Image: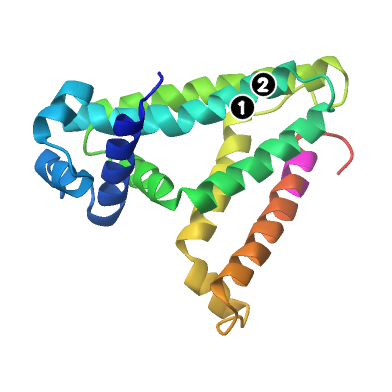
Amino acid sequence: MDFNDKQIQIIETAEALFADRGYDGISVRDIADEAGVNVAMISYYFGSKEKLMEAIFELRLGNMQMRVETLIKDDSMTPLQKMNLLIDEHIDRVMQKQCFHKVMYTVQLTNKNPAILKAANALKLRSAKLVAELIKEGQKKGVFKKKVDVILMLNTMVGTVSSTMMSLPYYKEFNNQADMPQEEFESIVKRRLSIHIKSLFKAILTNEA
């Protein structure tokens, strides 16, 4: 789905509010006031708060799906290079869109709204199937193992990155980096996550570990 600028503004406002106060703690009126629009506009564009939440997933996960589709068609990189690029881009997305990933995590953890959870899972399933296509490419070329549990592999990446980003103060204290500027610290975390997950994926996908 293509969203116009006003829809994206509303989506990003709702995303930030949901991340801060939870889905149940926010009303459509709250979103409208924060976004500087009237309630009727939100109803016109999205229909309901539930559909607005689904639009958040569609925007964020849809971008990821388009990226995988592009990589599948790209013949300039090896299958492992494509996977490594997906890893780095996922880490970037989580670091840049922390509100969305907090919302996504909370939705799955609390499971209070089956319709929203179903919509989120449907989008995740589409993404996983695209990644599976990329893995099949590597299998056809003989560089990836024949048996790969795609969901467990993706959960390894998503869970590791999300857990790390939600516990940065703990990670910072454990590594005695309390006085380090936040930007420098996050750059280090990003690099460590990249190396860590790439090594795990290489072990899962190839015989080169």
What kind of residue is marked 2?
Thr
Asked whether the residues under the numbered discs 1 and 2 touch, taking CB atoms below 8 Å apart as contact, a structural biologist would say yes
- Disc ID at residue 36: none
Task: Give the residue drawn at x 58%, y 68%.
Answer: 183
Q: In the image, residue 76 lies at what x, y percent?
A: 85, 24
Q: Is residue 79 left or right of residue 35?
A: right
Q: Is residue 135 left or right of residue 170?
A: right
Quarter of the view holding residue 205 = top right
Q: Main secondary structure of the magenta part?
A: helix
Does the magenta portion include 201? yes
Q: Is residue 53 left or right of residue 145?
A: left
User: The residue tagged with tag 2: helix, strand or loop?
Assistant: helix
Q: Quadrant of the C terminus?
A: top right
Residue 114 shows up from this direction: no
Q: In the image, residue 99 lies at what x, y percent?
A: 38, 50
Q: Which residue corresponds to mark 1? A: 67
Q: In the image, residue 133 lies at what x, y percent?
A: 67, 17
What kind of residue is marked 1?
Arg
Task: Give the residue drawn at x 50%, y 20%.
Answer: 126
In magenta, the rendered stretch is 199-203
Quarter of the view holding residue 10 = top left
Q: Which residue corresponds to mark 2? A: 70
Tell me the crowding category of disc 1: few under 14, some 14 to 19, or many 20 or more residues within 10 angstroms, Cα based.
some
User: The residue tagged with tag 1: helix, strand or loop?
Assistant: helix
Please state which of residues 122 and 12 is positioned toward the viewer in this rendering. 12
Does the magenta portion include 78? no
Please state which of residues 82 and 111 is positioned toward the viewer in this rendering. 82
Q: In the image, residue 87 lies at what x, y percent?
A: 67, 41
Tell me the crowding category of disc 2: few under 14, some 14 to 19, or many 20 or more residues within 10 angstroms, Cα based.
few
In whole angstroms, how far apart are the C-alphas of marks 1 and 2?
5 Å
